Amino acid sequence: MDTRTLILFSLTVLPLVCTPGPDILFVASQALSGGANAGLRATAGIVLGYSVHSLAVALGLAALVATSPVVFETIRWAGITYLVYLSYKLIRSATQAGSLSVTAGNLQGQFSKGFLTSLLNPKGMMIYIAILPQFMSHRSGSSTLQAVILSGTFMLWCAIVYSLISLAVARVGGGSLSDARRRIVDGAAGGMILMAAGFVALAHH
């Protein structure tokens, strides 16, 4: 695959990566409450989740989802349900007293939650289904190899952008929060994730 194709693909997906959505709002909420380490762990989980989408493209499973509205809608609403659940947990936490100290166990949870967030994110899935195939060509060799290269490029941009967001947002939050500050942060984070669920639910596809 030539460099020109990779540049054009990057220019196409980068604005989508930078557009606020479930991934960015989740990373920001985790970095806000747990600091840069929490945001980076969430980012790693998200990138790993997208590797599953990459494998699906390479195996041709994405085409099945694209041609089956029932399968797509099932995945889309599973993602919405999961985001609403995360939002509920955070907002409920905001109503309960107690300071917060982020531990290694909590951070591991952020990795797995990040993985599920991207795995069930229709926005990322649609990038693979609708955009990635447009940059593949029968004249450029193996379709599987092309899919892997393009998927890797997308995941690289996700890792870079979300890591920068984690570092930037972490300046606002920290690893330890007082009761009052923790309530505000949990409430704000829950609201951000609920907005993400709304974006997904109202998205046209």
Image (tube, rainbow, N blue to C red):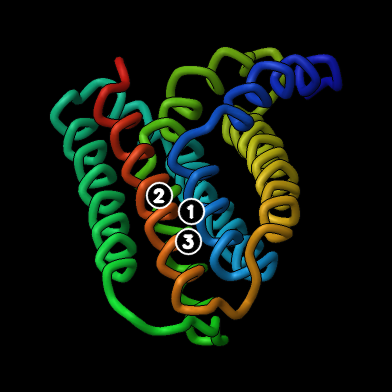
* Residue placed furthest toward the left: 70
Determine contact: label 3, label 1, CB under 8 Å: no
Gap between marks 3 and 1 measured at Cα:
26 Å
Q: In this view, does 9 lie above or below 27?
A: above
* Residue holding disc 2: 119
Gap between marks 3 and 2 measured at Cα:
25 Å
Q: Say which residue appears at 36% left-offset and 54% top-offset.
A: 190
Of residue 183 and residue 90, the one placed in the foreground of this image is 183
Tag 2: amino acid:
Leu
Q: Tell me: 198 left or right of 153.
A: left
Residues packed near mark 1 inside 10 Å, few (<14), some (14 to 19) or many (20 plus): many
Q: Say which residue appears at 66% left-offset and 17% top-offset.
A: 12
**Nearer-N-terminus badge (3/1):** 1
Q: Quadrant of the C terminus?
A: top left
Q: Say which residue appears at 41% left-offset and 67% top-offset.
A: 183
**Nearer-N-terminus badge (3/2):** 2
Tag 3: amino acid:
Val
- Residue 41 place in picture, x, y as percent: 60, 67
Q: Say which residue appears at 45% left-offset and 48% top-offset.
A: 118
Q: In this view, does 148 lie above or below 205?
A: below
* Residue holding disc 1: 49
* Disc 1 element: helix
Determine contact: label 1, label 2, CB under 8 Å: yes
**Nearer-N-terminus badge (1/2):** 1
* Residue holding disc 3: 185
Gap between marks 1 and 2 measured at Cα:
5 Å
Q: Residue 99 carries which label?
A: none
